[in-house]
Amino acid sequence: MKNAAVIGAGIGGLALAIRLQSAGVATTILEARDRPGGRAYVWEKDGFTFDAGPTVITDPACLAELWELSGHAIGSDVDLIPVTPFYRLSWPDGTKFDYGNDEAAMEAAIAALNPRDVAGYARFLAYSAAVHEEGYVKLGAVPFLDFRSMLKAAPALARQRAWRSVYKTVSGYVENEKLREALSFHTLLVGGNPMATSAIYALIHKLEQDGGVWFARGGTNRLVAAMVRQFERLGGELRLDDPVERISTEGDRVREVKTRAGYRIEVDAAVCNADVLHSYRDLIDHPSAKRSARRLARKNWSPSLFVLHLGVRGLFPDIPHHMILFGPRYRGLLDDIFNNGVLAEDFALYLHHPSASDASLAPPSHSTFYALAPVPHLGDAPLDWAIEGPRLARRIVAEIEKRLVPDFGERIVTQFSYAPPDFETDLAAHHGSAFSLLPSLTQSAYFRTHNRDDVIENLYFVGAGTHPGAGIPGVVASAKAAASLLLAKPG
């Protein structure tokens, strides 16, 4: 294997490119946007730095490994700082719950909700450790290319009763409804419905408890910049602002990748970090690609997001870095988002306050926020976001005023939003989905887009739409899985 092209400079694509370049494969990354990062994009506006996301970094060891491959240290390129508490959870009745990995503090917080749930929480953590071992350590970076590989994994998944939802599993351990919400909402961070997503995703708790929750000083974009630095240090080439238009095949092999500006590169292998449906439908010229696109179009897709970015006058020491503002409904709101295609009048918010950890992200005496609300994707709710966006933004600001800062709206000095059509336009995301394919049991592992195409023998996939799924650890694991296949293949 002499050379490869990676289409898309998201975190998954960058991770794969680093692995290839570390192994001596001359790798070129082709990125459509003017900056690398994919969903981890960044804007600078009026002195504020606004990360598009993802903003929660777990399992930093999976990132550090990308530097260790070539004898370097991640700390030389980016400063990862711990966030505590991991999240502050807040309900409309004023209840607050700080979630972290301080055992004594967690026991006290749980006991304040329901003393009987302290022992149940300990049992839940033991369950989380078991599914982490089976679903992440053993299988996270293992490519599922045929059904036999799924059958091999099935007994272990069955032992953990993976067919149950995360919420149902959590409910078997704790009684308090608020605690059930606190221990099940994490699947929303990877685009899954807590009421339906496989209990395997309870492994997120083990990831957080062992590895912590981290933030890249300067913003998630600094992690992206560090990955680019490591890739280019190894001799890799990154080409920006030039979308790939065609992945040309000859027989059952990719022969050439061509961009809109006319750049052409003959390759021994091509790797797609772009949206999986977009890749098959719009880029790949092989006859099998249209069949794959039709299959993908019939699958279930994760919801989208409405993200309101806010530059605000003042400092807010009482608002931690990560906060979840639950709404008055949990199951009903999730049904509206995932099943009913309804933009509900109530909502739940993830409030990101990065300047709580790094004051450089805002001008002096100012703060940077974003408020994120999961919303139905465009296939379920083809709304006019030019109308709905400003309306939802006003409601979000009003909710923050009601629950946290009474004069919040008056303090806003700059704001802009990112809505489902932006995901569709900027990222070619099908239906404007923010997380690609829905992470359900029947769309996981073998049933997800394979890390190597079934027909085109030198075409590979990384990112949220492939195994194992969305989130930084997920896309980095997808890169490890794809690299194991690609580097094992003779040139």
Image (spheres, rainbow, N blue to C red):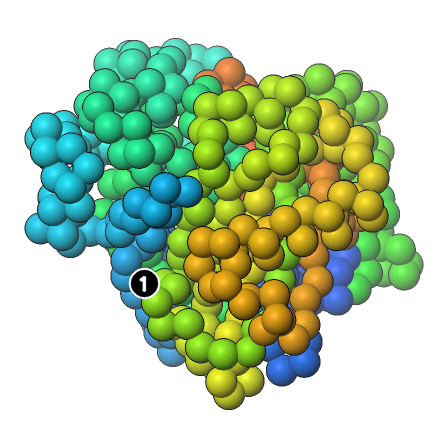
Tally the numbered discs. Answer: 1
Q: Is residue 102 found left or right of 384 in the rendered image?
A: left
The kind of residue tagged 1 is: Val
Residue depicted at x 40% and y 54%: 323
**Residue 32 position by quadrant:** bottom right
Name the quadrant of the C terminus.
top right
* 294 displayed left or right of 300: right
Secondary structure state at the residue bearing disc 1:
loop
Q: Is residue 355 above or below residue 47?
A: above
What residue is rendered at 42% in x and 72% in y? Answer: 316
Residue 150 appears in the picture as rendered = yes
Q: Which residue is mark 1?
A: 83
Which class describes the residues within 10 Å of circle 1: few (<14), some (14-19), or many (20+)? many
List x then y, in percent, for residue 2.
Answer: 61, 54
Residue 266 visible in the shown view: no
User: Above or below — where is 123 with respect to 372?
Assistant: above
Which residue is located at x 59 percent, y 56 percent? 397
Q: Is residue 233 above or below residue 284?
A: below
478 vs 18, nearest the viewer: 478
x, y percentage for residue 57?
A: 40, 56
Residue displayed at 30% across by 28% down: 177
Q: Position of residue 466 (x, y in %)?
A: 56, 34
Quarter of the rendering containing residue 119: top left
Left or right placement of residue 180 versus residue 423 in this view: left
Front one among 409 and 20: 409
Q: Residue furthest bottom?
A: 364
